[in-house]
Amino acid sequence: MATVDVRNVRKSFGDHEVIHGISAFIEDREFVILVGPSGCGKSTLLRMIAGLEDITAGEIAIGGRVVNDVRAKERDIAMVFQNYALYPHMTVYRNMAFSLRLKGMDRDEIDRRVKRAAEILNLSDLLQRQPRQLSGGQRQRVAMGRAIVRNPQVFLFDEPLSNLDAKLRVQMRSEIKDLHQRLGATTVYVTHDQLEAMTMADRIVVMSEGYVEQMGSPLELYDQPVNTFVAGFLGSPAMNFFEGRIGREDARAWVDTADGTSLPLPASAPGNEGQTVIYGVRPEHIGLSGETLAMEAGVVVMETTGSATQLLADVAGTRVVAAFNGRHVFRPGERVSLHPELEHVHLFDAETRQRL
Amino acid sequence: MRDYYKGYLFILPAFLLLLIILGFPAVAAFLQSFNLMWVATPSFTLGSYKALASDPEFLTSLMNTVIFVTVVVSSHLVIGLGVALLLNMDLRFKWLWRVVAILPWTMPDVIGGLVWRFMFDTLPGIVNSVLLRTGISAEPIDWLGNPTLAFLSVMLAESWRGYAYPMLILLAGLQAIPRQQYEAAELDGCSAWQKFIYVTLPNLKHMIIIALVLDVIWESRLFGMVYSMTGGGPGYSTQILTLLSYKQYFQFFNVSYGASMAVVLATVLFFISLPYLRMSMRQQL
């Protein structure tokens, strides 16, 4: 197993630069997820680590060895593709054995490795099937088996769950996580799904438009997002934002929005009086009662999942989402008081959109 | 239910047209080959078919057809696959190369035959003048006068004229291969050649069969190219079945005999097309 060191990497297609000098260090045995909206460059970065794209500038080192000029097949990495990319004319067994056969590995050793991987992935009964006879989840497992048998230094996953239905995705999520814990392999995983990133990663790299926005553990990013992009990208439903000016008096602080709502701030909150800020609060950090200033809201829509209740409300023209544990009943048009939890309020500079 | 009938209405004109220009001649040839149509006293006989079996000219032409189709179709597949692979790469002016690659196929086969006849001409032909000027040959070569050379020349010319059709089929097949399969093969450690063997060829298998069957049918029915280039000569050396059938039917007016050859050819081609028919039926079900 190995570390992956990305140093000031750039990528251009023609004159168009899509990755603008990214650095990231991935520890040995770490599970790192690159996440961001489509077009943010996460897949391109992964493909550069794999050796499927040239590196325009900067360096990538795997296990301490700079691999810029090392061909993909010599980088000792394995990749799982979104559409599985199985060889359609080969059985499951041959799909998994293929890379080992190319290496000229001895038959018994190949057989041992394929059978062990099949056992880990619950594929033992399917070894003689063709890919077209398998379900989506089974194909995904074969694609992982193909990676496992090689015992590579680094596993790369490119949106591996995007082609699966919602239920299977949740199941495969824990399977991949479990697999990582058992094999202890350094893993770089690309997804656009923040939920996958939050639930699976040791560390998340949030990317946007070819830049790294923030890097850190899921909860670090969730609790201390460095800017409004990260704050809005992680978490579902997304964080609520209001623009306003900070007001202070004695030991009290608040934010006044343009439409006249006052939002509560802890006295210790950063920022100067009169400063224009973005006020952020997550839906689950809004309560129905409290001693803080409240947002007077009109109920628009209520959704329930059985275990939780989600409320879409209108606060003087701004849509606000609040989420509550358990069951509550709201009627459209009903007036409610929404109380942001002071200790969970985020403040960002309105201009730079960076955390204060 | 009414839409169902409307569908038939829409295909009716095409169906009638096919019935007249293909169906009628096919039935007529079939009846004529048994001496049942357009003769003074129709009476069923297998005479024409019996005569075929012992006619050296027919057997020579049949052999010529087999050799011609085998060689031409093989070269079409090789050239077609090669060109398709080139056109499938990231090239500058890709559209231009595609147009150039398809040009030979846009030429009517009679014209193609004439062009090649001029090129292979003994005196002013470009092939001989290049050979003479570069000193490769001291004397002009009678390409179309020598039986072996004439047959080779015809096959060469048709290899050029007809490769674009299988090429287009194979190119469509190549473009349908997912890029990730090549990338997975790259990561698995495949060389360029191994990628061709393990990814390209298996994915292209169906398209190759389709191209093969259609091209065999196409080339077995070829007439204009050979007729205008050599007329079947010298002797019978470039005479393929379609030329002999035409000669017997329209020049010697051996209606029954000429028709029986057409029926034999059509029957053979029908059986060759079975795998293709089965494949396309299965896809529609």
Image: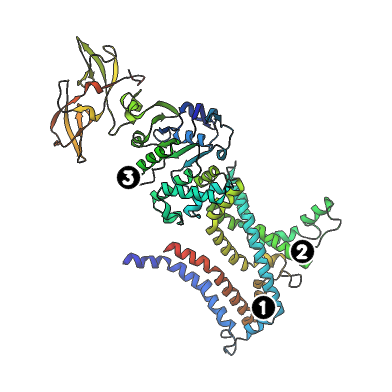
Q: Amino acid at mark 1?
A: Gln
Judge whether A25 appears above or below B103 on screen.
above
- Evaluate if marks 2 and 3 touch, with contact meaning CB atoms under 8 Å apart: no
**Residue under the image location 51 percent in, 28 percent down:** A10
Q: Residue furthest top?
A: A250
> Separation of disc 2 and disc 3 at Cα?
68 Å
Specify whether A341 is left or right of A133: left
Q: Which residue is mark 3?
A: A166
- Return the x and y of residue A69 as percentages of the image width and height: 59, 33
Q: Which residue is mark 2?
A: B149
Q: Secondary structure at mark 3?
A: helix
Q: Nearer the viewer, residue A263 or B136?
A: A263
Q: Residue furthest right?
A: B138
Judge whether B274 appears above or below A28 on screen.
below
Q: Secondary structure at mark 2?
A: helix
Q: Which chain's residue wears label 2?
A: B
Checking the image for residue B248, the label placed there is 1
Q: Amino acid at mark 3?
A: Ala
